[in-house]
Amino acid sequence: MSLLTALLAVGATPALAVPGGDAGAVFTLSNDEAGNSVLVYARAGDGTLSLVDEVATGGLGTGGGLGSQGALTLSDDGRWLLAVNAGSDSVSLFRVNGTGLQLRGVADTTGDMPISVDVHGNLAFVVNAGSATIEGFRIGYSGLTSLQGSERALSGDDVGPAQIEFSPDGRALVVTEKATNQIVAFRVGRYGWVSEGVVSSSAGETPFGFEFDNRGRLVVSEAFGGAAGAGVVSTYTLGAGGATAVDTEATAQTAACWIAITENGAYVYTTNTGSDNVTAFRLNHDGSLTVLGHTDVGDSPIDVDFSDGDGYLYVLNGADDSISVLSAGPGGSLSAVETVTGLPAGTVGLAAS
């Protein structure tokens, strides 16, 4: 029985987002090994969420955590949603219309266990954790088409990739490798041609989730293998020679793993999976970071994303199968709005509009 069907069976009628305000949607991935699906939540103007749909991806999950950021992602224009099917080695493409999803295609990733996907324009790339490769696709109204010759290897076998993401201009792809403490950058051509990877050492150990800020700098959470109180966040510039560290700041928390940045590039937030909280940083013009404080969330926060306009921060909590809804205030402050419970065990990924 799907989560939505179960709610209806007990008489809980999902409500649509209220008119007016900053309404939108939040998507997360069930990662169910019997049949993967996207859970669709309507986002009201006050940030609160209501489950409105559950849409099959046409693939399979793994039933457990993926250790990645970007298991599903929205295109910049909000028209497309992509989701990985780590249990069946495929990626799914959905057309998005508000809270409505229409499956447009499922494509083989030609590798083993895709865990993260990103999109820029009509190009999408996945990183396959099992085969330590990346693979590209072209997006069209008829679905996904594999980009011939786009497969590239990471720095070696068993490197533990965590995320793949395009640079803001679409000219580079970056992958973090948890097991090697390395960051791999690939140049991308106009039609999806991809160079071999350029490998750089990370400033801290276990580089995990990351985002680019609005100046094109890379901001990476580094978990130090989950050592108590050892998590950091580092900033990098990205050039032809790879990633160059600018600053590293300690969270003094455990397992800094996932990252979100405000659209104006002023604030950075990382989830500390072992400390059950989120650390806020001010991102300064020179790329340095200033710790602002910590906000408690649910049990083992794993993924995080901002709503359009940065009004609300959504945090997926892996151990208690919930989403923490936080209101973003002045000076990088966060305040609790609600906690949405009852997500399927093993849920991964978060994307908000």
Image (cartoon, rainbow, N blue to C red):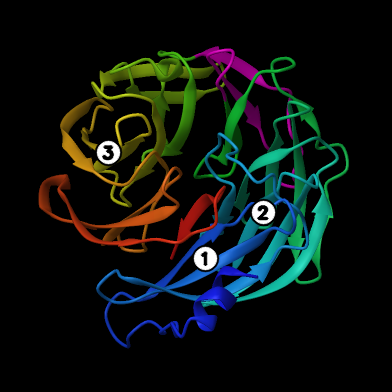
- As helix, strand or loop, the secondary structure at mark 2 comes to loop
Q: Which mark is residue 32?
A: 2
> Is 61 on the left or on the right of 259, as rendered?
right
Q: Which residue is depicted at the point 38% across and 15% down? A: 227
Residue at disc 3, secondary structure: strand
Q: Are marks 2 and 3 in contact (CB under 8 Å)?
A: no
Whether residue 217 is visible to the viewer of this picture, yes or no, is: no
- Residue at image point 55% right, 37% down: 68
Could you say which is closer to the camera, residue 12 or residue 141?
12
Instruction: Tell me the CA gap for discs 2 and 1.
Output: 28 Å
SS state under label 1: loop
Q: Quadrant of the C terminus?
A: bottom left
Name the mark on residue 324: none
**Where residue 277 sits: x, y (%)?**
27, 38
Q: Quadrant of the N terminus?
A: bottom right
Q: Amino acid at mark 1?
A: Asp
| Residue at which label 3 appears | 277
Q: Nearer the viewer, residue 215 or 135?
A: 135
Is residue 179 magenta-colored? yes
Marks 1/3 in contact by CB < 8 Å: the verdict is: no
- N-terminal of the pair, mark 2 or mark 3, is 2
Does the magenta run of residues contain 198? yes
Asked whether the viewer can see residue 8, the reply is yes
Q: Which residues are magenta?
A: 177-201
Q: At 81% across and 70% down in the image, what residue appears? A: 142
How far apart, in angstroms, are the residues tagged by discs 2 and 3? Answer: 26 Å
Q: Can you tell which mark lies on residue 77?
A: 1
Give the mark count. Answer: 3
CB contact under 8 Å: marks 2 and 1: no
The structure residue drawn at horizontal position 73% and vertical position 23%, both measured from the top left corner, is 196
